[in-house]
Amino acid sequence: MKLIRYGAAGKEKTGIIIGDTKYDTSAFGEDYNEHFFETDGLSRLKQYLDANEGELSKIADDERLGSPVARPSKIVCIGLNYRDHAEEMNAPLPPEPVIFMKSTTALVGPNDDITIPKNSVKTDWEVELAVVIGKKASYVEEAEALDYVAGYCLHNDVSEREFQIERNGTWDKGKGCDTFAPMGPFLATKDEVADVHNLRLWLTVNGKTMQDGSTANLIFNVPFLIAYTSQFMTLLPGDIISTGTPAGVGLGMKPPVYLNPGDVVELGIDGLGQSRQELKAYVKN
């Protein structure tokens, strides 16, 4: 299944993609959130779809898409998880996964604008595979880790490099700004993805290709990341692990290249769709 959420920000309804058509599932009566995943929502949704085959209303093509997962309890990110990206950062290959957190208030829809933060001069892009957790995970064994996966999403791990690197402390300061986690367009359940470790992922800025990589080049693969992360924190249903980015980020260019108002970022992953964000200057509300 391919799950979507659509409508005005903060008032999203649920939906599903069948073939290339979007259908409303709001009569199912649940959002795609922690409770949904925790209570075997994917199986119950499948039963609902079977019972209502041919009866679902279509969603207009121009409807806004929100994040396919309602606000998770946490967004866990993995840094320097592609060999070529570590090399462009002049960083040694990590002996263990680098973990940082991205605030849930950064979460937006796949085609929403990205706001360049106040006083930012180094806003950057990162195309990433995001893993959505399907059931509570604590001290998981690597051999069983994929049993805890609900599905996968496309994610742009937007980053402010000055805040991240030059302002002391953890990376989190440059990762959790508002609009810095465009997610989707949809959540593909894991049966939709034949080989999560053989997916092309790419990103362009103003039509120019910046990133073009493959999940085959992950340093730490998806089962290892789930098992490893679960040793340090309990992962709840609906939580997201974003698995790192390949080479081609703005910080890695010589000289570095950063995003400006009016720039357009487009990105995609095989089988997980595409997204598009336009950069906007910060304006006080």
Image (cartoon, helix red, strand yellow):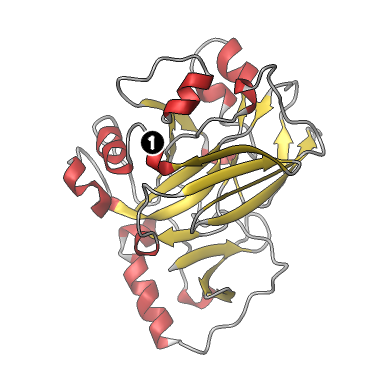
Residue shown at the point (62%, 34%) measured from the top left: 125
Residue shown at the point (56%, 29%) measured from the top left: 175
Residue 140 picture location, percent across and down: 20, 41
Q: Nearer the viewer, residue 270 or 66?
A: 270
Three-letter amino acid code of the residue under disc 1: Leu
**Res 173 quadrant in image:** top right
Residue shown at the point (71%, 26%) measured from the top left: 258
Residue 267 picture location, percent across and down: 61, 47
**Res 174 quadrant in image:** top right
Direction from residue 157 to residue 227 in the image, left or right: left
Q: Is residue 135 visible?
A: no
Residue 284 picture location, percent across and down: 80, 33
Quadrant in which the C terminus appears: top right
Q: Nearer the viewer, residue 253 or 29?
A: 253
Secondary structure of the residue carrying tag 1 is loop
User: In this rendering, is residue 271 above or below 174?
Assistant: below
Residue shown at the point (57%, 57%) measured from the top left: 185
Q: Please tell me how crowded label 1 is: few (under 14), some (14-19), or many (20+) other residues with Cα within 10 Å.
A: many
Quadrant in which the N terminus appears: bottom left
User: In this rendering, is residue 203 above or below 219?
Assistant: below
Number of numbered discs on residues? 1
Disc 1: which residue: 218
